[in-house]
Amino acid sequence: MGGKLLSIGECMVELSQAGEGLLRKGFAGDTLNTAWYARACLPDDWSVDYFTAVGDDPLSSEMLEMMQGAGIGTGHIRRIAGKTPGLYLITLKNGERTFSYWRDTAAAKKLADDADHLRTAVETADIVYFSGITLGILAPEAVETLLSELRRAKAAGKTVAFDPNIRPRLWPNKDYMLKTIEDGARAATLVLPSFDDETTHFGDKTVAETIARYHALGVENVVVKNGAEGATLSFGGTAATHAPAVKTAQVVDTTSAGDSFNGGFLSRLVRGAPPAEAAAYGASVASVVIGHHGALINPELLPQ
């Protein structure tokens, strides 16, 4: 029996290195990446929709066409006159990436401005996914609008999945950032943090400390991603389990490693796979993705 996954956030124009001083244009963003990999890994009886706001320019039209071509629903996406998408540039060195961003006037920053439209989209979904970047691009009042709807979804029994994906440059100060990330976690039933973010910004010394902190915020299920060390899962108060990372022959580009893990993981979890099995599949997806350039790779390359 299928269902519907709704991913909420920002899709941007992506410029990546194409060699000989040239750049390759694409479209990506953390929650779009997760939606894209979930769509690629889910059967046809599941639908995946994206929720954001875009402009009325040609690039926004191309972005919507890309999503539609990948089988991602765009029916809930608002178009705002005079706005454009944000843009980012990937710079690679030894497989590790750095980003430069241009997003100050991006349409996605207004994705939660129409509360009724947001509520309609969330109510149609079985699973709702969002991230710390989703929260970080929004004005404080829009953050509260979004979290209010997600708390309603959680209370109604929906699965609400949250990747804290902490990016300090999006936030006016650290205190507001950490408080809002915690508020996001409180609205979720499943949190998928990266341990390097948690130790850097919350000061966690161990993965167990990260798990305990999120459980204390009322999160039932926690999956801590820890790069080459694999993922540690704590579901429903049971003892933590571990899913090892999957080695790749050569790390080419770590862009979307965590996003692709999330998409692969959710694609198995929502169909009833045990959490550790779902995490093992997510790790296998991520291991393939980091062996190729760009955030989104050919779905035919993904493990079946």
Image: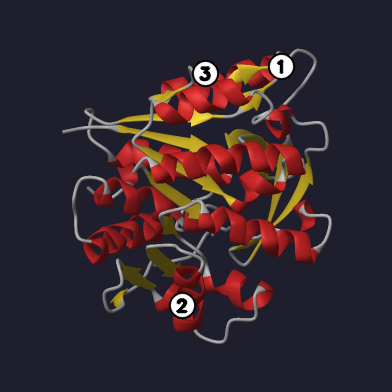
Q: Position of residue 54 (x, y in %)?
A: 66, 23
Q: Secondary structure at mark 1?
A: loop
Callout 3: 10 Å neighbours few (<14), some, many (20+)? Answer: some
As shown in the figure, which amino acid type bears the numbered disc 3? Glu
Q: Position of residue 46 (x, y in %)?
A: 27, 31
Marks 3 and 2 sit apart, C-alpha to C-alpha, by: 42 Å
Marks 1 and 3 sit apart, C-alpha to C-alpha, by: 17 Å
**Where, quadrant-wise, is the N terminus in this rendering?**
top left
Q: Looking at the image, is mark 2 or mark 1 earlier in the sequence?
A: 1
Please say if 156 is above or below 214.
above
Please say if 145 is above or below 166.
above
Q: Looking at the rendered structure, which numbered label has been put on residue 212?
A: 2
Q: Position of residue 97 (x, y in %)?
A: 65, 59
Q: Position of residue 201 (x, y in %)?
A: 68, 72
As shown in the figure, which amino acid type bears the numbered disc 2? Ala
1 vs 3, front mark: 1
> Which residue: 20% across, 45% down?
271
Q: Looking at the rendered structure, which numbered label has been put on residue 80?
A: 1
> Which residue: 38% across, 31% down?
125
2 vs 1, front mark: 2
Marks 2 and 1 sit apart, C-alpha to C-alpha, by: 42 Å
Q: Nearer the viewer, residue 115 or 121?
A: 115
As shown in the figure, which amino acid type bears the numbered disc 1? Ile
3 vs 2, front mark: 2
To which quarter of the image does residue 255 belong? bottom right
Pointer 3 residue:
65
Residue extending farthest to the bottom is 205
Callout 1: 10 Å neighbours few (<14), some, many (20+)? Answer: some
Q: Secondary structure at mark 3?
A: helix
> Which residue: 78% across, 56% down?
169
Q: Looking at the image, is mark 1 or mark 3 earlier in the sequence?
A: 3
